[in-house]
Amino acid sequence: MYPVVLRLEGRRCLVVGGGKVARRKVEGLLAAGAVVTVVAPRVDPAIDAVPEVAVERRPYRSEDVAGCWLVFAATDDPGVQQAVFDDGQRAGIWVNAADDPERCAFFLPAILRREPVVLAVSTEGRSPALAAWLRDRAAAMLPDQLEHVAAQLVAERDELRANGIPTEGRDWGARIEQLLAQYSDDHPAAGPST
């Protein structure tokens, strides 16, 4: 497996299926800024309620994958799942078939977002429950001020680069520790009142 983080903003993505699993795929795609189309004869009301989603109430057709960056097959029909995967393969488009690792060109990890930090844990589609458990345990160990530290590091790195100073080889680990300590001193945890 080769893990990546994809930029989907403004990219057309297709979800075949209209149930609860499809709804979760739609939510993730919208969070990434994708342009989402759902194709299914029946669609969950929660999907219908999102004006940014183009919904086509009909069976899947092979030409639906044309022009898509990513496709999700989220139906309970093995024949449709296989057709979506096959059509994506022929078109050179990545397809993820929900709960069907053999029909996946990619897998979705369990994700935690604390912008700009994204923590992703994968079991290569074999155990989503384990991936979610690991993500939750890792999330509990992350500092509360992670977003602030990340924002400061981004600003410092951008300033160095703007001034033509290389960012490689710097002791970023020490700087992170310094920022965490500084933020903790500036924002101490609330203790019991006396």
Image (cartoon, rainbow, N blue to C red):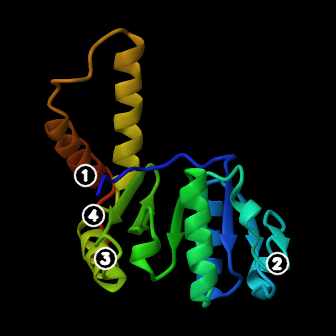
Asked if marks 4 and 2 touch (Cβ < 8 Å), the reply is no
Circle 2 sits on which residue? 49
Identify the mark nearer the N-term, 2 or 1.
2
- Distance from disc 2 to disc 1, alpha carbons, whole Å, reads 45 Å
Mark nearest the camera among 3 and 4 is: 3
| Mark drawn on residue 131 | 3
- Distance from disc 2 to disc 3, alpha carbons, whole Å, reads 30 Å
Circle 4 sits on which residue? 142
Can you say whether 63 is above or below 55 in the image?
Answer: above
- Distance from disc 3 to disc 4, alpha carbons, whole Å, reads 17 Å
Identify the mark nearer the N-term, 2 or 3.
2
Q: Residues within 10 Å of mark 4 (few under 14, many from 20)?
A: few
Residue drawn at (21%, 23%) of the image: 168
Asked if marks 3 and 4 touch (Cβ < 8 Å), the reply is no
Residue 71 placement: quadrant: bottom right
Identify the mark nearer the N-term, 1 or 4.
4
Residue 133 placement: quadrant: bottom left
Identify the mark nearer the N-term, 4 or 2.
2
